[in-house]
Amino acid sequence: MNPDLERLIRLQQIDTFVESARRTVADQPAHVQALESRLDEAKRRLTVAQEALSANQAARRTLEKDLAAQQGRLSKFKDQLMEVKTNREYTAMLKEIDVAQQEVRRTEDRLLERMLEADELSGAVKTAEKGLAAERTEIQQEREALDQEIAKLKTDLDASVGQRQALVKQIDPRALSIFETVARGRKGLAVAEAKDGLCTICHVRLRPQKFNDIRRNDDILQCDSCQRILYYAGPASAAASTSEWIPD
């Protein structure tokens, strides 16, 4: 393979890695924020469950007070029933007792509903607590993994910059100029594989003779459509794909 072509392939691999790594590093704050948002949501669910349980407990206390007052009133009416002297007073007092008994039953029913509801709400609080604990553990693990990934990427980036600087010095200025010109116009992707008679990036079919020339990998040849530098990575070629480079 043409030495400069081989160097340009490696240069593209480095540039592709560097661009991807820099995007990942730049995205770290957004990833951290997403993790924090997940934790905040788990906390919010727990707060909602706790507030619902607290509201239930407050309502139960109010009902218990109402029930105590109603039972006291009913007891009072029953005591007064023994003191009435006329049938009219007796009938009136029975009516008061009946009304009071109905109020007591309604309040007891409402209190029972609140007690049953409390069981469900207590379960919801426990579920939310477990969910928060699990989410906190998982987020912590993800955060540690992210920090490790970013630290490694930064180290690899520093190494890649040094490798690129050394590599650029070895490339023929004319070939390097072509690479840099194409890279500026093609979002950093200046080198592409030619395969099955096509440029694998723009997918335009190459002239048969040009594809045959590219397959020899002995010159700097460009795609007639997108102008990218083309190489052939057939079975006999040692060139790796421009997207498969891993820092040393």
Image (cartoon, grey):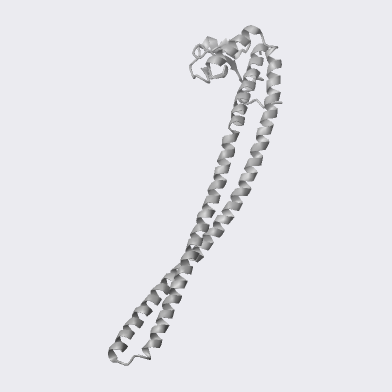
Percent x, y for residue 239? Answer: 65, 20
In the displayed structure, would residue 43 be above or below residue 80? above
Percent x, y for residue 204? Answer: 48, 17
Image quadrant in which the C terminus is located? top right
Percent x, y for residue 27? Answer: 58, 32
Which residue is located at x 40 percent, y 87 percent?
Answer: 79
Tell me if 65 is positioned left or right of 42 in this view. Answer: left
Instruction: Residue 156: name its quadrant.
Output: top right
Instruction: Residue 69: name its quadrant.
Output: bottom left
Percent x, y for residue 112? Answer: 45, 71
Can residue 2 be seen in the rendering of this structure? no
Image quadrant in which the N terminus is located? top right
Tell me if 189 is positioned left or right of 90 in this view. Answer: right
Judge by depth and name the residue closer to the eye, 98 or 42. Answer: 98
Instruction: Residue 142: name its quadrant.
Output: top right
Total numbered labels placed on residues in the image: 0
